[in-house]
Image (cartoon, grey):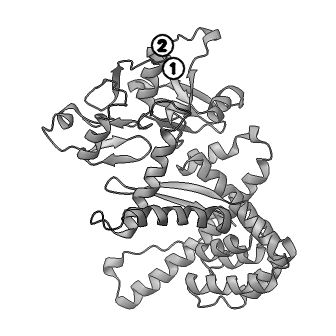
Amino acid sequence: MAVDSLALPDADPAWLSHDERIGLLTEIEDARAALDALQVETLAALSRSDLSPKQWVRDEVACALRIAPVTATGKLHDARDLVELFPLACAFLADATISRRHADVLLELARGLDPATCTAVETRVLRRVSGQTVSQFRQTVRRAVASLDRRGAQEQHLDAVSRRRVVLTPQDDGTAEVWALLPADAAAHRLMSELNRCAAATRGCDDRTADQRRADALADLAALADSSGGGAEPTGPSVQVTVALTTLLELDEAPGELAGHGPIPAAMARRLAFDPTGTWRRLLTDLRGQLISVSPGYRPPAALREHVIARDRTCRFPGCRRSARSCEIDHRLPYRHGGETSEDNLHALCPRHHHLKHEASGWRVRRSRGGDTEWRTPTGRTYVTAPDPYAY
């Protein structure tokens, strides 16, 4: 399929009749489905060429699509599985019989099956897909998988347990969601039983709801683990918070920022900043919010390393959000080639993108005017990243 063969709608909705606007919506959906199918085919082809981690294909895809490298990995794997396991669904997507959301539901619910069963599920559900919403299609796929899955219950359970994970998702207003997929018996219910026990023990002591008491009990378990390191003193919050001096002095209520989360309310920032077990570092920024200097804290590593970590905040590869604290400090111009160990020549790179810079043929990186990091890919494309600015 060629891009110029796609019939993209070309109309101004303001000058259309009601009937023509409804028709335009249909044309847009058809064009979107065709483009999604073409992207899936392209990503699948790229995925097949990325047989070795040293190919670094996912990283160039991440730059091109302006997404995080880990997200690019998921897109590449999903595209390859769609093309290889569900070719009929890809054809339906290309002619706009289904949407990408329908295809994603099929991939999500049937990917763990063997290829023959995937084909059987695909054939059965696509016979019924016409006119179905995504929600209705999800139920159709669930029924088909339940009917055709030839794995035993124990094998299905072990496959599900292999996908166990914990995910932290920042929310608004200084909150975050912690989501976990755990084995039902030995982990999930045991954890919930303990939270219920803790919540019941404090019932009637205050005006908190049961949900609030369970949430506080979960936070208390983390605090208890933090303070019980074989008799060691509590280490305090292992988080980095950025807050303006005017906010600390309660001259204003400008929000602070929690590393890896985003904006938090001024009161929360002050509470974290004044925690007696925490560590203070002074950050001086310019009018653009870019770091000028940083003072070392208690038992710091080299002051220069601390400066680079505080300045860069995350890995300097486009889209990568790995915290600079867990990155490696790299010389932009290698030391052996005359590169100085200086603030201008150092930046934070996660281990993967540190290896990419040194091992991948065709990748080039330099510091551009204004202190930004400029990456040039093997295909000649250029991407510029700048450290996230501090509030000012």
Question: How many residues crowd around disc 2 within 10 Å: few (fewer than 14), some, or many (20 or more)?
Answer: few
| Residue found at the far left of this picture | 251
Disc tally is 2
Amino acid tagged 2: Ser
Neighbours of disc 1 within 10 Å: few (<14), some (14-19), many (20+) = many
Asked which quadrant contains residue 294, the reply is top left
- Quadrant location, the C terminus: top left
Q: Amino acid at mark 1?
A: Leu
Residue 162: image location, x then y, percent? 73, 59
For the question of whether residue 222 can be seen, the reply is yes
Quick check: 242 left or right of 222? Answer: left
Q: Let me know if residue 113 appears in the view.
A: no
Residue 342 bears which disc, if any? 2
> Residue 218, image x and y in percent?
46, 56
Q: Residue at x 73, y 52 (%)?
A: 46
Q: How far from the left and from the top, in percent, is residue 52?
A: 79, 42
Q: Quadrant of the N terminus?
A: bottom right
Answer with the quarter of the image where residue 79 lies.
bottom right
Q: Residue at x 56, y 83 (%)?
A: 135
- Taking depth in this image into account, of 216 and 337 the one nearest to the observer is 216
Query: Disc 1 marks which residue?
Result: 346
- Residue under the point 58% across and 55% down: 166
